[in-house]
């Protein structure tokens, strides 16, 4: 890599979309855990 090479960063829209998908994945995992806990206590 040369110092003059452009930085290999994804565009802001892609980074925002990745952050949103990561948050959605965490929320989905938490919802699954809560649902399994609720169903398991019945």
Image (tube, rainbow, N blue to C red):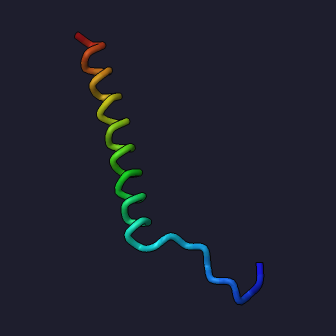
Return the x and y of residue 10 as percentages of the image width and height.
Answer: 50, 70
Quadrant holding the N terminus:
bottom right
In the displayed structure, 31 sits above or below 37; it is below
Left or right of residue 5: residue 11: left
Residue in the picture at 38% in, 65% down:
16
Instruction: Measuring from the top left, give residue 5's x and y in whole percent.
Output: 69, 84
22 w.r.t. 17: above or below:
above
Up/down of 22 relative to 3, above or below: above
Image height check: is 22 above or below 1?
above
Q: 39 or 21, which is in the foreground?
A: 21
Left or right of 1, for residue 25 = left
Identify the residue at horizontal 33%, vertical 47% (top origin). 24
Residue 6 image offset from top left, x and y in percent: 63, 83
In this view, the residue farthest toward the bottom is 4
Q: Position of residue 37 (x, y in %)?
A: 31, 21
In this view, the residue farthest toward the left is: 42
Q: Residue at x 43, y 66 (%)?
A: 15
Q: Is residue 10 left or right of residue 1?
A: left
Give the quadrant of the C terminus: top left
Q: How many marks?
A: 0
Residue located at (37% from left, 70% from top): 13
Q: Residue furthest top?
A: 42
């Amino acid at each position: 890599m040369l110092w003059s090479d452009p930085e290999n960063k994804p565009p802001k829209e892609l980074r925002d979309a990745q952050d949103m998908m990561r948050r959605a994945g965490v929320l989905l995992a938490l919802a699954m855990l809560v649902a399994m806990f609720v169903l398991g206590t019945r």
